[in-house]
């Protein structure tokens, strides 16, 4: 029923936007002041003579409800242009200040927009490509609206490992099928590096073989047993899924529903890298002294080992102690540690004390040190301190702090040397076990309470872990497994890298592969040995307790037997190093009868480490003090 704009009345057959016959024949009223205005709705009609228009007098009954209803019917909401019943726009809606409703509306529209995009992607390469109807959504893109794309989760499962040798796929290292869930926007470089770490851990454990690079293996589709196109391994995991999910030969319909990709891994196995000690490949050095050195070096270039590292020199193992800038105010502090300023080690003490909780009883005890459990911000640590150095059973707080600082400094030097050793082995593609120093160690000093003045060396606590000893203070290591041979070669490396001035001894640590599941170490973290309490023999004898100087270096030189890692790194023979740097100042070497062989094993004689509390090999009495020691020089 149309409404006449002249008199305000409604007529059943009147065309919308026209006037009734009477108003059409009337003369126009040029003066607007003469037009009639409704006292209820406020609308103006040129020929209305009443005070209330036709609609207000007949339909609203004075409350305006029916009028509002009729306006809503006459001007419905347009979902495409986002106008309301009054013709208002989305801009007016945004101005209403209802931020929560705006965000919810944008989220819904963004999800609908991405669903349309995904529908197009799923038809790519199929007979339905290009047959998706145009979208009816009229809005800005999610990127323009600043709305993140809804993240989809995809599963990547590694089902089996193979060796690829001489064009054949042979059974690889034992491997339990592993499924990992990733966001679909994860870069493929991250995914492949996770796979490399898992494969490397499996081969390192079973074959003593290392997989250092993603180019050393090939991905296979588990269902089709064909190689994955390398071009699919660029971009993101979402790109890979879009390219393969429509191909049932690569991803089954059941796996599509699970958002699952199943791969196998074929390792390009290099038998030459498989590290096994062989007397034919690593000849034992013959002869003693400078004459023997000259005889060996005169055999020609073919007899020389190829150098794969450049020694750092003795200066790299000489630490100059600097003095931190003083503010003139002395503060009692709890935490201290070494830091490096240029080439000098500077002792830093923090000024903000904090609370720690310490167990009353020690849980491990050695000949010189005890260890107690310490809690800092609900995290558990091991805190060590010296209780007996010279057999008197008493150690002053000052001496305790001095010796702990020496031990912490040795840990920093160990960390730097281990990092260079691992990088050298990786660069030369030599199968070695990853080793590292105690990176999170520091010293705390008690400032209040009955133990005021006592200092502790604090290390991470690995509960239920077994500390393994690879060598003694005056007994060189002679291990047969990859982790052990790596530590033996690392000791040789330290002597070579320091030009004969330093050698790491009493090497011991914890292998992360032996830690229980409760340790929380994820599967995509490479297995490694974290070394603790390593001691140093130096030509200057400046590295604190256990440093036996050139005598300790001589013992190592006469006992060490090179393995294939030493040879592949191109390390100089230990006797050559002695003849070059020590023969002029110290007596010539003598062969010792106690030279260890490849079957030598070591007991855990130094039980001051916290992780040894559950070690069945530790020989402890009821007081937790070890009675027997493998070497006389252990701390």
Image (cartoon, rainbow, N blue to C red):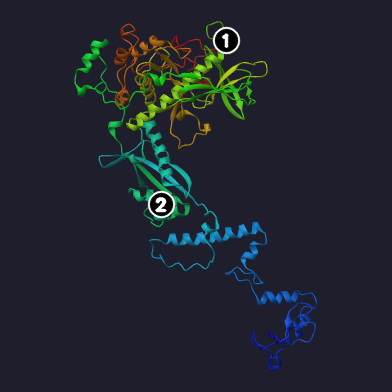
Q: Position of residue 592 (x, y in %)?
A: 33, 8
- At a point 39% along the width and 46% down the height, the residue shown is 263
Q: Going by the image, does 220 lie left or right of 53?
A: left
Q: Is residue 616 visible?
A: no
Crowd rating for badge 1 (residues with CA inside 10 Å; few <14, some 14–19, many 20+)? some
Rendering quarter of residue 33: bottom right
Q: Which mark is residue 423?
A: none
Between 529 and 621, the residue placed more toward the observer is 529
Horizontal and vertical percent position of residue 135: 50, 67
**534 w.r.t. 127: above or below:** above
**In the drawing, what numbered circle is on residue 240?**
2
Q: Residue at x 55, y 55 (%)?
A: 147
Left or right: 346, with 548 as reference point:
right
Quarter containing the N terminus: bottom right
Q: Cα distance, mark 1 to mark 2?
A: 64 Å
Nearer to me, 476 or 8: 8
Image coordinates for residue 584, horizontal then vertical, percent: 31, 8
Residue identified by numbered label 1: 395
Q: Is residue 115 visible?
A: yes
């Amino acid at each position: 029923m149309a409404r006449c704009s002249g008199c305000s009345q409604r007529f059943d057959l009147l065309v919308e936007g026209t006037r009734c016959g009477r108003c059409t024949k009337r003369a126009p009223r040029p003066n607007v002041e003469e037009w009639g205005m409704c006292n209820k709705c406020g609308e103006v009609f040129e020929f209305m003579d009443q005070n209330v228009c036709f609609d207000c007098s007949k339909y609203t009954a004075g409350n305006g409800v029916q009028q509002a209803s009729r306006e809503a019917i006459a001007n419905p909401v347009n979902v495409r242009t986002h106008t309301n019943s009054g013709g208002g726009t989305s801009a007016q809606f945004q101005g209403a200040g209802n931020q929560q409703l705006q965000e919810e509306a944008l989220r819904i529209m963004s999800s609908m927009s991405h669903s349309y995009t995904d529908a197009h992607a799923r038809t790519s390469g199929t007979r339905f490509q290009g047959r998706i109807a145009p979208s009816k959504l009229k809005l800005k893109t999610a990127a323009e609206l600043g709305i993140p794309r809804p993240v989809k989760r995809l599963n990547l499962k590694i089902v089996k490992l193979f060796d690829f040798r001489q064009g054949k796929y042979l059974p690889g290292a034992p491997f339990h099928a592993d499924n990992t869930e990733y966001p679909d926007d994860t870069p493929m470089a991250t995914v492949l590096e996770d796979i490399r770490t898992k494969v490397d851990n499996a081969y390192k454990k079973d074959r003593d073989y290392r997989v250092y690079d993603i180019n050393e293996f090939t991905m296979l589709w588990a269902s089709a047993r064909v190689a994955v196109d390398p071009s699919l391994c660029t971009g993101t995991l979402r790109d890979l899924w879009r390219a393969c999910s429509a191909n049932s030969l690569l991803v089954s319909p059941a796996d599509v529903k699970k958002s699952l990709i199943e791969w196998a891994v074929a390792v390009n196995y290099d038998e030459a890298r498989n590290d096994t000690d062989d007397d034919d490949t690593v000849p034992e050095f013959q002869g003693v002294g400078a004459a023997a050195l000259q005889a060996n070096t005169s055999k020609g270039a073919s007899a020389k080992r190829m150098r794969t590292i450049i020694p750092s020199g003795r200066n790299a193992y000489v630490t100059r102690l600097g003095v931190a800038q003083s503010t003139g105010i002395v503060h009692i502090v709890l935490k201290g540690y070494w830091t490096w300023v240029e080439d000098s080690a500077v002792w830093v003490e923090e000024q903000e004390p904090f609370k720690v909780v310490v167990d009353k009883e020690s849980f491990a005890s050695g000949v010189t040190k005890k260890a107690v459990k310490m809690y800092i911000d609900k995290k558990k640590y091991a805190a060590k301190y010296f209780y007996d150095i010279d057999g008197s059973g008493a150690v002053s707080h000052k001496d305790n702090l001095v010796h702990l600082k020496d031990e912490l400094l040795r840990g920093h030097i160990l960390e730097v040397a281990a990092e260079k050793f691992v990088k050298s082995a990786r660069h030369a593609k030599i199968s070695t076990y990853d080793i590292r120093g105690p990176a999170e160690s520091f010293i705390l000093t008690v400032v209040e309470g009955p133990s005021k003045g006592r200092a502790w060396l604090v290390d991470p606590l690995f509960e239920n872990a077994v500390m393994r000893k690879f060598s003694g203070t005056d007994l060189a290591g002679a291990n047969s497994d990859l982790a052990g041979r790596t530590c033996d070669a690392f000791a040789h490396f330290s002597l070579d890298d320091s030009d004969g001035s330093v050698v790491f001894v009493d090497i011991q640590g914890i292998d992360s592969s032996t830690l229980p599941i409760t340790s929380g170490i994820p599967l995509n973290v490479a297995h490694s040995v974290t070394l603790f309490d390593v001691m140093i023999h130096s030509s200057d004898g400046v590295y604190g307790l256990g440093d036996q100087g050139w005598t300790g270096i001589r013992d190592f030189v006469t006992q060490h037997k090179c393995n294939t890692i030493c040879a592949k790194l191109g390390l100089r023979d230990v006797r050559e190093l002695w003849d070059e740097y020590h023969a002029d100042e110290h007596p010539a070497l003598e062969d010792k009868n106690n030279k260890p062989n490849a079957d030598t094993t070591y007991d855990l004689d130094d039980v001051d480490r916290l992780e040894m509390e559950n070690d069945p090999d530790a020989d402890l009495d009821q007081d937790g003090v070890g009675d027997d020691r493998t070497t006389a020089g252990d701390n």
